[in-house]
Amino acid sequence: MRKICIVTGTRAEYGLLYWLIKGVNEDPDLDLQLIVTGMHLSPEFGLTYKQIEEDGFTITRKIEILLSSDSSTGISKSMGLAQISFAETFEQLNPEIIVLLGDRTEIFSAATASLIAGIPIAHIHGGELTEGAYDDALRHSITKMSHLHFASTEQYRQRIIQLGEQPDTVFNVGSIGLDNIKKLSLLSKSEFERSINHKLSSKNLLITFHPVTLENNSASEQFNELLEALDELEDTLLIFTKPNSDKDGRVIIQLIDDYVLKHSTKAISFDSLGQLRYLSAITLMDAVVGNSSSGIIEVPIFNIPTINIGDRQKGRIMGPIIFNCTPTKEKIREALKKAIYLPKPVVWEHPYGDGNATSHILEIIKNTKKISLKKTFYNILTN
């Protein structure tokens, strides 16, 4: 059997990869090697590796890399520890291909270790832009280290080719996150309320806000502006999901904890809702607020508006019910009014695929028997 190694470091990423992990695990011709790292192994972020095990998957290796710091120095040290650990693990497991999603620091470390070890990489969600975060540079770097590319839109596929990747190695498969929407049976309102132990209000907002990592020390200021805008709303339940282990992420976590403690009747928070509760929540919200990629890709599928704050997602392809605003109380307040009270378009063409990304990726990986590590740069100026 061909050994396919999949790496996951966060709860959100695992939710996106779930059906692909399941598909590889159930395929008689493939041998799943599942590496779990990063936030999954941290008590601070909910020890979400337990959910992976509860889902019936055998974790091949747990790689501990998180240091108790979200400073730039601490994160760089975590990346160094991650690269050492991935190098040792890849030597032991000797996979035929490594599957990586996205652009996080631990994924960059895995890609670098894989490149040096001479193991081909299949990269999901390359070619995208997020100009407000250093994820942008990490993502493009991972693209240059990868050998198979699974883009979520045709525009992103073309950008990967622009980076010099051969067109026959770059595939527009759609966003893998849409597979969950297509395959999961979502919770009803009463089921969701029981799952969060709280009744919904007349208005409800789901809030996920991450640090903008190319800005220095902006997390506290921007999130306080958001809280002040939200605090003006009446008869509105605020459901916070906490940020990832990014630089300055703990600042936001502390602000959420303090706010919920002071406003327990109208605000609740979760380390992680998980894919089922998160997607179910979206269907019951008046809007989703913050700067997460899910607000751009998954939320509009349900015809629910997104208030996208600041530059973190700048450059992504966006639909008509995404309301962009600067991270100030006044602009957030204006965007909230537009999103919640203006009529929303019912029909629009979603650019991120049809919810069948997993089957496309599996088919391509299975049919690609031989991958050359020696890549030739594709020059769009001469082709």
Image: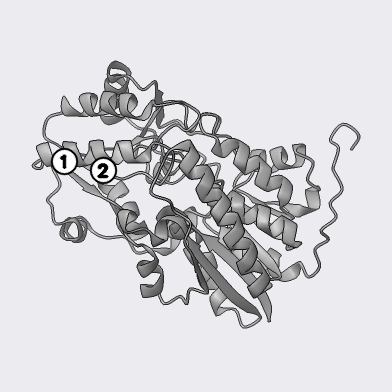
Where, by quadrant of the figure, is residue 364 drawn?
bottom right
Q: Amino acid at mark 1?
A: Val
Q: CA distance from mark 1 to mark 2?
A: 9 Å
Q: How many marks?
A: 2
Percent position of residue 101, x then y: 57, 53
List the residue tagged with mark 2. Answer: 240
Q: Observer-nearest residue: 295 or 290?
A: 290
Query: Residue 244: percent from the left, percent from the top?
Result: 40, 46
- Pointer 2 local density, CA inside 10 Å: few below 14, some 14–19, many at least 20: many
User: Would you say 284 lies left or right of 215 here?
Assistant: left
- Element type at marker 1? helix
Q: Residue at x 16, y 60 (%)?
A: 194
Residue at the image point whose x is 78% and y is 70% from the top: 369
Q: Give the left or right position of residue 108, taking residue 200 as reference.
A: right
**Residue count near mark 1 (Cα–Cα under 10 Å), binned few <14, some 14–19, many ≥20:** some
| Nearest to the observer: residue 32 or residue 9 | 9
Q: Is residue 313 left or right of residue 127?
A: left
Q: Quickly name the residue at label 1.
A: 260
Residue 311 horizontal/vertical position (percent): 47, 27
Quarter-wise, where is residue 337 in the image? top left
Q: Is residue 237 visible?
A: no
Label 1 or label 2, whichever comes before in sequence order: 2
Indicate the quadrant containing the N terminus: top left, top right, bottom left or bottom right: bottom right
Pick the quarter of the image with the C terminus.
Answer: top right
Residue 92: numbered disc: none
Q: Which residue is located at x 39 percent, y 33 percent?
A: 345
Residue 283 in sight in this render: yes
Residue at 38% in and 25% down: 218
- Of all residues shown, which one is farthest toward the left? 265
